Amino acid sequence: MAVERTLSIIKPDATNRNLTGKINAKFEDAGLRIVAQKRIQLTKAQAGEFYAVHKERPFYDELCEFMASAPVVVQVLEGEGAIAKNRDVMGATNPADAAPGTIRAEFAESVGENSVHGSDAPETAAVEIAYFFSGLELVG
Ligand code: ADP
């Protein structure tokens, strides 16, 4: 399987509860390497641009408000099959459906405030990584 990179975000509900280290340990235990990471404060407009694909969904405004409500940690995770592996470690969108041991099963507060974002395909990973990181920040 190919080595991939994927974009991960530790969301405001998790940074508020000081869970960055516990969530990073889940990634590292699963064999994902954190090759870039920074803590930033998104504006609502930036969150809206990032989640533009969800513009027509009923929860879009709530999602953008939430993502701009406190700092987030944006990261690039690298590893064999990193995109699917990260989705496995994250668990299902709704924590009620997330498998035991996954980040969302252990830490998410609701379907909206669900602690982490992860890219869902190679094409979106490339676009999402470029949204937050320059090539100079990706040292492997
Ligand atoms: P995922 O993050 O698992 O890829 P989606 O792409 O479907 O899930 O949704 C993006 C984000 O939008 C979710 O992680 C969550 O924060 C929010 N969201 C999804 N569904 C709902 C919902 N029914 N109500 C509120 N927020 C939601």
Image: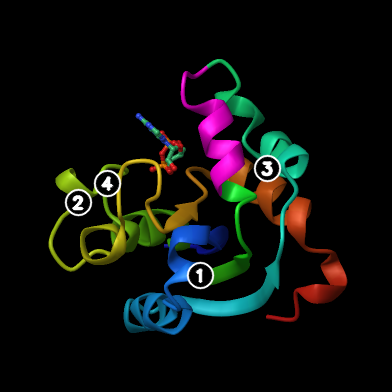
Measured Cα–Cα span from mark 1 to mark 2: 20 Å
Q: Residues within 10 Å of mark 4 (few under 14, many from 20)?
A: some
Q: Quadrant of the N terminus?
A: bottom left
Question: Disc 4 or 2, which lies upstream in sequence?
Answer: 4
Residue on which disc 3 sits: 47
Of mark 1 and mark 3, the one earlier in the sequence is 1
Left or right of residue 87, residue 124 in this image: right
Of pointers 4 and 3, the one earlier in the residue sequence: 3
Whole-angstrom CA distance, mark 4 to mark 3, is 21 Å
Q: Quadrant of the C terminus?
A: bottom right
Q: Amino acid at mark 4?
A: Ala
User: Measuring 63% from the left and 64% from the top, which residue is drawn there?
Assistant: 71
Residue 37 in the image, given as x and y percentages of width and height: 65, 75
Q: Residue 98's mark?
A: 2
The residue under label 1 is 15
Q: Are marks 4 and 1 in contact (CB under 8 Å)?
A: no
Secondary element under disc 3, as helix, strand or loop, is helix
Whether the residue carrying mark 4 lies under 8 Å from ligand 1 is answered with yes
- Of circles 4 and 3, the one toward us is 3
Q: Nearer the viewer, residue 122 or 35?
A: 35
Label 1: few (<14), some (14–19) or many (≥20) C-alpha neighbours in 10 Å: some
Find ligand 1 in the image and state its quadrant.
Answer: top left
Q: Is residue 12 magenta?
A: no
Indicate if the residue with disc 3 has its beta carbon within 8 Å of ligand 1. no
Q: Mark on residue 121?
A: none
Q: Tally the numbered discs.
A: 4
- Residue depth check, mark 4 versus mark 1: number of the one nearer the observer: 1
Q: Position of residue 86 (x, y in %)?
A: 40, 61
Q: Which residue is mark 4?
A: 92
- The CA distance from mark 1 to mark 3 is 16 Å
Q: Amino acid at mark 3?
A: Ala
